[in-house]
């Protein structure tokens, strides 16, 4: 699946509506990646399957201004499950990602519609 909003300028962020597409593309590119709410949830569910855990995420609002998609950050969370250096096993990653999933669900319930998710490899 392709990014939801493809930008012509590589310096512009790339938007995804699929967690799997985000993980696969993230390995190939260094520009910022943003996810819709469903994609952020999917990343939490599948990241450990790709040997990643959620290191950090920001919750924000997705705006369309003059045809451009804009991300407005609102709140953030940094990994707190046993400390970033303590996530060493697939089980640690799954537990960490479950915490991120619960927090992202709460952010969605609060009206957040877009997310910037940082993954770290196990």
Image (cartoon, rainbow, N blue to C red):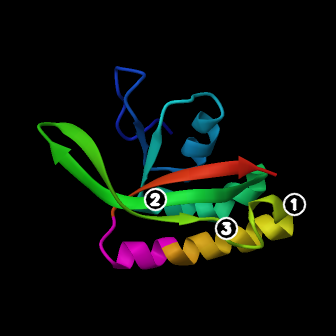
Q: On residue 97, which mark appears?
A: 3
Task: Identify the element where label 1 is drawn.
Answer: loop
The answer to whether residue 109 is magenta is: yes
Where is residue 60, by image quadrant? bottom left
What residue is drawn where x is 58% and y is 58%? 56
Question: What secondary structure do most residues of the magenta stretch adopt?
Answer: helix
- Nearer the N terminus, badge 1 or badge 2? 2
Q: Which residues are magenta?
A: 104-112
Disc 1 from disc 3: Cα separation: 13 Å
What residue is drawn where x is 42% and y is 22%? 10
Where is residue 7, by image quadrant? top left
Task: Identify the element where label 2 is drawn.
Answer: strand
Query: Which residue is more in the foreground, 70 or 8?
Result: 70
Residue that badge 2 annotates: 58
What residue is drawn where x is 87% and y is 60%? 88
Residue that badge 1 annotates: 88
- Nearer the N terminus, badge 2 or badge 3? 2
What residue is drawn where x is 55% and y is 44%? 22
């Amino acid at each position: 699946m392709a990014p939801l909003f493809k930008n012509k300028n590589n310096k512009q962020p790339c938007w995804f509506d699929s967690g799997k597409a985000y993980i696969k593309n993230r390995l190939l590119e260094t520009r910022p990646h943003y996810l819709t709410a469903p994609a952020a949830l999917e990343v939490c569910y599948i990241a450990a399957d790709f040997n990643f855990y959620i290191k950090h995420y920001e919750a924000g609002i997705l705006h369309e201004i003059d045809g451009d998609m804009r991300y407005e950050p609102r709140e953030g969370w940094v990994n707190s499950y046993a400390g970033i250096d303590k996530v060493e096993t697939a089980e640690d990653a799954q537990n960490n990602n479950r915490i991120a999933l619960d927090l992202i669900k709460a952010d969605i319930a609060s009206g957040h519609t877009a997310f910037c998710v940082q993954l770290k490899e196990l």
